[in-house]
Image (spheres, rainbow, N blue to C red):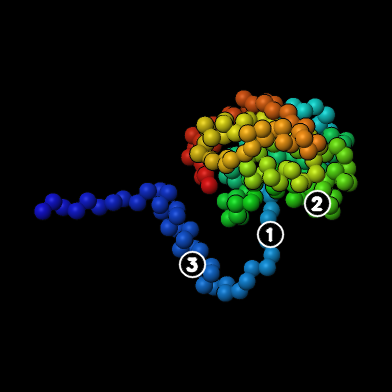
Amino acid sequence: MPARRRCTPTRRGLRRRARYTAFLARIQSHAMLYAQVHLTLPAWIHDAVDLQASYPGDADKVALAIELSRRNVEARSGGPFGAVVFGPDHRVIAAGVNRVVPHATSLAHAENMAYMLAQQRLQNPRLNQVLAPITLATSSQPCCQCYGATIWAGIDRLLIGARAEDVMELTEFDEGPLPADWAGELERRGITVVRDILREQARQVLHVYGQGGGEHY
C-alpha cells in the first residue's frame, strides 16, 4: 500500500487557522455584547496630510489620495486604497485609507473612513448641507459598497484615479456589482464624476500591492 501523502498547509491556510484560534480566544474571554465600534487611521496620517494646504486642481486632490494609498501599502497598515474629502476652499476636511484587516471589519474601506471622519468633523451625515461643493478624491474607483455610501454622503464631485478593472487586474480584490451606468446614476443625483486622473500612478500602487502578495478580502 503506497505511503499516505502528507499535505503541507499553505501560508494562507496557516493565517486563517491563526485568525480562527485568536477569534475563539476572544469570544471565550469576552462573553458580552459589543456595543461600540472603534476605528482609527494609522499614526503616519498626521505627517502625510496638511490641513492648511490647498489642493486647487483635480490632479492635486487625486495625487494626495494616491500618496495615502502608497504609504498605506509601504507601512503595511491596510489595503492599497486612499481617499480624501475636500471642502469648497480646496482644503482637506478628512482623509481615509483602507483599514479592513487591522480593524477586522469589511466596512473600513478608504472612502467610508473618509466619509465617516468628515461627517463627524462637520457633525452632519450629509456633508454638503454644511459646506458646498464637497469633493471626494479616491485613488481607485469605489467598489459597490463605497458606491452606495457615496450616494448618501453628501458630495458634489467624485474624482477617481484607477478604474475598477485596474483593481481586479492588478490585485485579487472583487469590486462587486455596480449599475451598468454607475457614473450616470451618480450624475443624475447631482454628483459630477471625473475618471482616469493620474490613472497610471494609481495603477502602480495596485501593482506593487498585488506583486507583494498583499491580503485581499
Secondary-structure class at tag 3: helix
Q: Residue 4's mark?
A: none
On the image, the x and y values in percent for residue 127 come to 83, 46
Residue under pointer 2: 125
Can residue 102 be seen from the camera position used here? Answer: no
Q: CA gap, disc 2 to disc 3?
A: 36 Å
N-terminal of the two: label 2 or label 1? 1
Q: Quadrant of residue 131?
A: top right
Single out the mark in the foreground, 2 or 3.
Answer: 2
N-terminal of the two: label 2 or label 3? 3
On the image, the x and y values in percent for residue 23 come to 51, 64
Can residue 8 be seen from the camera position used here? Answer: yes
Q: Quadrant of residue 139?
A: top right
Q: Amino acid at mark 3?
A: Leu
Residue under pointer 3: 24
Query: Residue at point 53% right, 35% down?
Result: 168
Query: Residue at point 59% right, 29% down?
Result: 203
Q: Amino acid at mark 1?
A: His
Q: Quadrant of residue 110?
A: top right
Q: Are marks 2 and 3 in contact (CB under 8 Å)?
A: no
Q: Is residue 27 left or right of residue 197?
A: left
Q: Amino acid at mark 2?
A: Pro
Is 175 located above or below residue 59 in the figure?
A: below
Query: Residue at point 45% right, 53% down?
Result: 15
On the image, the x and y values in percent for residue 19 come to 48, 58
Q: Residue 38's mark?
A: 1
Is 32 located above or below residue 125 in the figure?
A: below
Q: Residue furthest bottom?
A: 31
Front residue (pair 66, 127): 127
Single out the mark in the foreground, 2 or 1.
Answer: 2
Q: Residue furthest left?
A: 1
Q: Is residue 38 left or right of residue 104?
A: right
